[in-house]
Amino acid sequence: MRSIIVLATAITCAGLSFGANLAQANTINASLKLEVNESDGDAKVIVSCSSREPISRVKLWAPDGRVLVDLAGTPRIPETSYLELEGDDSSIDAVRDEYPEGVYFFHVYLDGQTLFYDVELSHEVLAAPAFEPGDESVLDPENATIEWSPVVGATGYSVEVEQGSRRLTWQLDSGQHAVTLPNGYFERGVRCEIDIATFCANGNACLTESTFYLAPERGELVPDLDFEHAGETSFYPLTPGLSRTFEDSDGNKLNVTVLFETRFEQGVLTRVVEERYWQQAELRSITRRYMAISSEARELYCFGQDVDYVSQGVIVEQVLHDTVAPWIALPDGTTSPKKGWTSRVPARVVIVDHLLSLEIGGTVFSDILVVSEPSVIDPSEQVLNFYSAGVGLVKRDRLDSTVVGFIIDDDDDDDDEEDDDGDDDD
């Protein structure tokens, strides 16, 4: 994305020159920008200088006399020079300390003349816009509109949307608070990055960023419902980062983690839930299930699963996309699910009991759904899952819940050294 525009730029182009008149001096545009990203809390500095005439050198002095920039220029196009220097991302406080408020001094060297410019830097900045859709939203590609609330005092806004090599930008006045994406320009089902900046009277700006998708076409067997890839049902918290471990006394262990990763399945953006199963301390399988919650009924749907079978640390078999149609993995508890409820015909998931309570390791869990489903290790056999209302899975067969926690990030959750969730905070 763009270099995280802008904490502060207030420029006074009072040009003086040796061997040049004022008209020539005013052909120079010089700026000093401190950029801040409200989403990440970091900042950087951009120094730029442009002219219709070739620039041979640019020097920048801080108010305290430090030389901050001293670099030579190379013409970008005939009769035009453009120099830009971007600093590294740093904390906002560190950038403000390095570049305090005050007057900075540009010396711009052209052929046979030197021009001098004063650039006043201010740290004053307005808030970034609060906009819709929210992060990881899925938009209708035929009416994909980004809207934000007006920021009091704003003189304008900038919007940038990027998807790979495709990019659109808008420079808007203070009365415009929405942009609509042209239908067909961005690819459906592929992450788009967006940032929106607020500008104020002194040229300063503050930026926030997010991501969204344009909805792909849905599969024919997907019900006509709205789905969410994060949230909670009565019996299952689909909360990114939530991780549970289940163990028995024989060295068998199961780890279930709701990853930060999302994935489109049959046109629906789903959350990846990873299950790792150890049998007598040896990793036997890695299952990735693609889950989503129906927005109105609050039922947990599974849109398929991929399974890696492991022997002695090596994947020996893969079963990919084990699905024909999405199925309800768990009903919503407010409908009082009864014994014998099935997710579909033929039954994939069956409620075999509904218990008032269950004690595990001295902790008593209440309102328990006992659910049968095919085993990953041997699909001809059934496993029993015990879900507690308001808690989630607390037991699978003889494996009892032992550890509950949260992972910080899952960039390398599948050991492929790739950034699976698309962020930059490895």
Image (cartoon, rainbow, N blue to C red):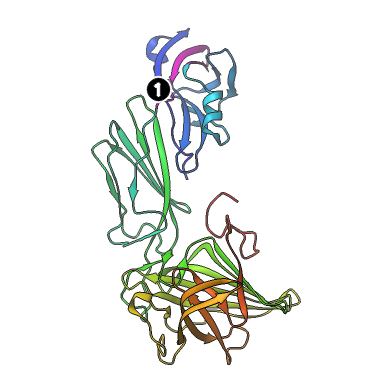
Image point 42% across, 14% down: which residue? 25
Image point 34% across, 54% down: which residue? 133
Tell me, yes or no, whether the highlighted magenta stretch contains residue 115: yes
Q: Measured along the vertical axis of the image, is residue 294 above or below residue 60? A: below
Residue highlighted by disc 1: 10
Which stretch did the figure color magenta? Answer: 103-124
Q: Residue furthest left?
A: 175
Closest to the observer, 369 or 139: 369
Image point 51% across, 85% down: which residue? 373
Q: Tell me where residue 15 sits by quadrant.
A: top left
Q: Tell me where residue 356 sits by quadrant.
A: bottom left
Q: Is residue 373 left or right of residue 341?
A: right
Residue 398 pos. (x, y %): 62, 82
Closest to the observer, 116 or 130: 130
Q: Secondary structure at mark 1?
A: strand
Tell me, yes or no, whether the highlighted magenta stretch contains residue 409: no
Predominant SS of the magenta segment = strand
Q: Residue furthest right?
A: 312
Residue 283 pos. (x, y %): 70, 75
Closest to the observer, 370 or 130: 370
Badge 1, how many Cα within 10 Å: few under 14, some, many 20+? some
